[in-house]
Amino acid sequence: MDKITQLPLAGIQLQDPPGFWPLAMGWWLIIFSVIALLVLWLVFVRKVSFKLSLAPARKSPSARKEAIKKLKRMTAKDGVGEITELLRQAAMTYYPREKVAGLVEEQWLRFLDLGLPTEHRNFINLADYWMTANYSGTGVDEKVFTVCQSQALLWLEHALPPSKHSVNALIKGDKPTQNKPETGNA
């Protein structure tokens, strides 16, 4: 037995425990799957948000209701310019700002008429009232104010929120056509 204890043996050396690196194949699959899902989700979100930006802005009816309340509180002292400003604010709430903001005078009135059903289109026919009242330095006649206010109320009630067709026509740059009265030619 003495000979066994005297053997020059080295101590037992254990291998290092396995580390995290390099990762096992399963971990690589999980990482790539998560990255792929994130990329697909981002593409989907961007695609949907782009489509929504082209679709009519379906704002809550509260914007329209608020504009109607404000219009009904207006008096002739406020002037037709205030009505025009209110209509422009309401239009920019529902339509693309860059398309509506550039409309002036007859283009603006045609745009307003385009949003209304045919039987209510009267902005172009009342162009003299709108132009005179908007650009005159003096106060406006009560009758002119009442006519403009009632036409604006019709627009707020019937044109908002806009149909998808009217928003798409405006986005594509289609020019609103003037409503020409029908002639009695038979």
Image: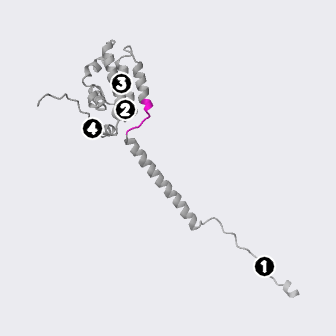
Q: Secondary structure at mark 2?
A: loop
Q: Is residue 28 visible?
A: yes
Where is residue 106? Give x, y as percent: 26, 26
Q: Name which of mark 1 and mark 2 comes first in the sequence.
A: 1
Q: How many marks?
A: 4
Disc 4 from disc 3: Cα separation: 25 Å
Where is residue 90? Give x, y as percent: 39, 29
Disc 1 from disc 2: Cα separation: 91 Å
Displayed quadrant of residue 86: top left
The boundaries of the magenta stretch are 56-63
Say above or below: 88 vs 38. above
Q: Nearer the viewer, residue 159 or 22?
A: 159
Which residue is identified by label 3? 153
Q: Name which of mark 4 and mark 3 comes first in the sequence.
A: 3
Which residue is identified by label 1? 10
Where is residue 76? Give x, y as percent: 36, 14
